[in-house]
Image (cartoon, grey):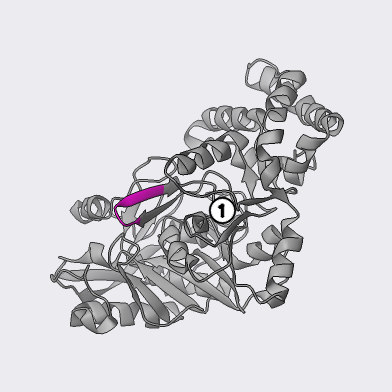
Amino acid sequence: MPALVLLGAQWGDEGKGKATDLLGGSVDYVVRYQGGNNAGHTVVVGDQKYALHLLPSGILSPGCTPVIGNGVVVDPSVLLSELSGLNERGVDTSKLLISGNAHIITPYNVTVDKVTERFLGKRKIGTTGRGIGPTYADKINRVGIRVQDLYDESILTQKVEAALDVKNQILTKLYNRRAIAVDQVVEELLVYADKLAPYVADTVLVLNQALEDDKVVLFEGGQGTLLDIDHGTYPFVTSSNPTAGGACTGAGVGPTKISRVIGILKAYTTRVGAGPFPTELFDEDGEALRRIGGEKGVTTGRDRRCGWFDAVIARYATRVNGLTDFFLTKLDVLTGWEQIPVCVAYEIDGKRVEELPYSQTDFHHAKPVYEMLPGWSEDISKAKTFADLPKNAQDYVKALEEMSGAPISAIGVGPGRDETIEINSFI
């Protein structure tokens, strides 16, 4: 049975939660493999809307085991709050598994994140201020705190001391902040030990055994391809690898186990935070996309920057992820435009460029080259098959498919769980 990777093919916020939820009834495990509570998924089930920040979307599918992999950074207070909120709404969260090797976002990671962004001023990255970057930095610097450390107070204390040796120097001497007491941090973290204990597991073993037993495992990325720390629009990126390769390291599953890689594409383009965005709109069309699409960050609450579809980015996502399929979301938002521009290439210093430039400088100067496609005015939210779509909507989808380099196997025509056209089965 397949191991599937599902990830964002733009700058995040493409509708991965809807796609994961659609597949949730057909898979046995849904795994978050990177990121933290800086990612958000909105899932609509019937008349109920669920905003998930850290938990895998599969937690809403009965019979599915949700897993937080070793590549995720976990804020225990956020996780427990999210679990409590779902329990109050009648969602069974008892099957959740958390890797003992996942790193913990500590209070001092959050503090460092916020004061650093303020210190950077106009050079700030636009982080969510939730401690994600500093936690990944601690992981790489080998002074991080892992979930398993909560169950050995001596080791936990030693690791907190090691981390604060340097951080307190920075906080007091550079940022003019108070030093953080080791005992206070240790005491706060130990409070979470018993509460998290029922969920902690050797998830690498669990997932590999599941695949050996022919179970279906879906790996769910947060953020998007263009926010990948290695392959995104650096430095305006996240601190982990949302691309397909990150699923292997962030969950402990070998690449030969992955059978399909599904990229989620919005029918236009959005991004949150700073950084280059060639097709960004500053006019009435941009405002209309934002309003009709409800483009506000699930986690941050910030308005998303909006622009037309960028086929250059889509082709890049296909290449670096080895995409086998696309799930196109929010096609319904484009209803009402007489013509819809699609970016097919860039102009950089007077030259036409059809692939994403590797140079940050070139990408900052890239200007979109548009091809105009005819729009449609018919309501498509009730469409159940591809043939139900107006001809111009069909042509738009076919054009995006040809430009992007992988087949579009599903189309979102509304926010609801049932407002999806399935062209080809993912499983």
At 60% from the left and 36% from the top, the residue drawn is 131
Span of residues in magenta: 45-50
Give left or right: position of 352 versus 155. left
Q: Is residue 366 visible?
A: yes
Figure quadrant of residue 136: top right
Residue, disc 1: 234
At 79% from the left and 38% from the top, the residue drawn is 149
Q: Is residue 253 visible?
A: no
Which image quadrant: the N terminus? bottom right
Give left or right: position of 18 versus 284. right
Q: Main secondary structure of the magenta part?
A: strand
Instruction: Please determine whether, in this image, residue 16 is positioned above or below residue 178.
Output: below
For label 1, the crowd category at 10 Å Cα-Cα, with few meaning under 14, some 14 to 19 and many 20 or more, is some
At 42% from the left and 82% from the top, the residue drawn is 424
Q: How many marks?
A: 1
Rendering coords of residue 200 (x, y %)? 71, 47
Q: Toward the viewer: 281 or 64?
A: 64
Give left or right: position of 198 versus 27. right
Rendering coords of residue 49 (x, y %)? 35, 49
Residue 31 sits inside the magenta stretch: no
Rendering coords of residue 191 (x, y %)? 68, 28
Figure quadrant of residue 78: top right
Rendering coords of residue 27 (x, y %)? 54, 69
At 54% from the left and 43% from the top, the residue drawn is 37
Q: Toward the viewer: 152 or 399?
A: 152
As shown in the figure, which amino acid type bears the numbered disc 1? Tyr
What SS does tag 1 mark? loop
